[in-house]
Amino acid sequence: MIIVPVKDGENIERALKKFKRKTEKTGVIKELRTRQAFQKPSVVNRRKMMKAVYVQQLRAREE
């Protein structure tokens, strides 16, 4: 559970900004999105391989 300490008289917008930053750092939202729909491990591995190939091609173009 994410806890955001709020000082007396602190603006609500500022507290919300802190909360959003904390949730983004922990990766809670990202994990929720991945858990919404199950993906077979073979599909996950294929996507990782395709992404690695894509990144490798981008880096090769830069050189």
Image: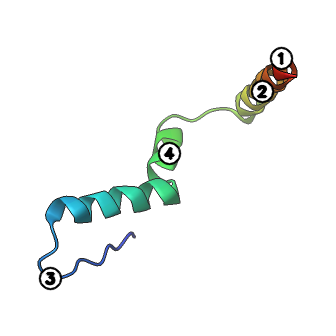
The label nearer to you, 4 versus 1, is: 1
Marks 1 and 2, Cα distance to the nearest angstrom?
A: 10 Å
Kindly identify which numbered label has been placed on residue 18.
none
| Residue at left offset 57%, top offset 35% | 38
Task: Name the N-terminal-most of marks 4 and 1.
Answer: 4
Say which amino acid is labelled 2. Val
Marks 2 and 4, Cα distance to the nearest angstrom?
A: 21 Å
| Residue 17 at x, y percent in the picture | 29, 58
Q: Secondary structure at mark 3?
A: loop
Say which amino acid is labelled 1. Arg
Query: Residue 57 vs residue 41: left or right?
Result: right
| Residue at left offset 81%, top offset 21% | 62
Pick out the residue farthest to the front: 63
Task: Name the N-terminal-most of marks 3 and 4.
Answer: 3
Which residue does the numbered mark 3 point to in the structure image? 8
| Residue 5 at x, y percent in the picture | 29, 78
Kindly identify which numbered label has been placed on residue 55.
2
Marks 2 and 3, Cα distance to the nearest angstrom?
A: 47 Å
Q: Secondary structure at mark 4?
A: helix
Marks 3 and 4, Cα distance to the nearest angstrom?
A: 32 Å
Task: Name the N-terminal-most of marks 1 and 2.
Answer: 2
Q: Residues within 10 Å of mark 2 (few under 14, many from 20)?
A: few
**Above or below — where is 61 with respect to 59?**
above
Which residue does the numbered mark 1 point to in the structure image? 61
Label 3 close to label 4 by CB (< 8 Å): no
Which residue does the numbered mark 4 point to in the structure image? 30
| Residue 10 at x, y percent in the picture | 16, 73
The label nearer to you, 2 versus 4, is: 2
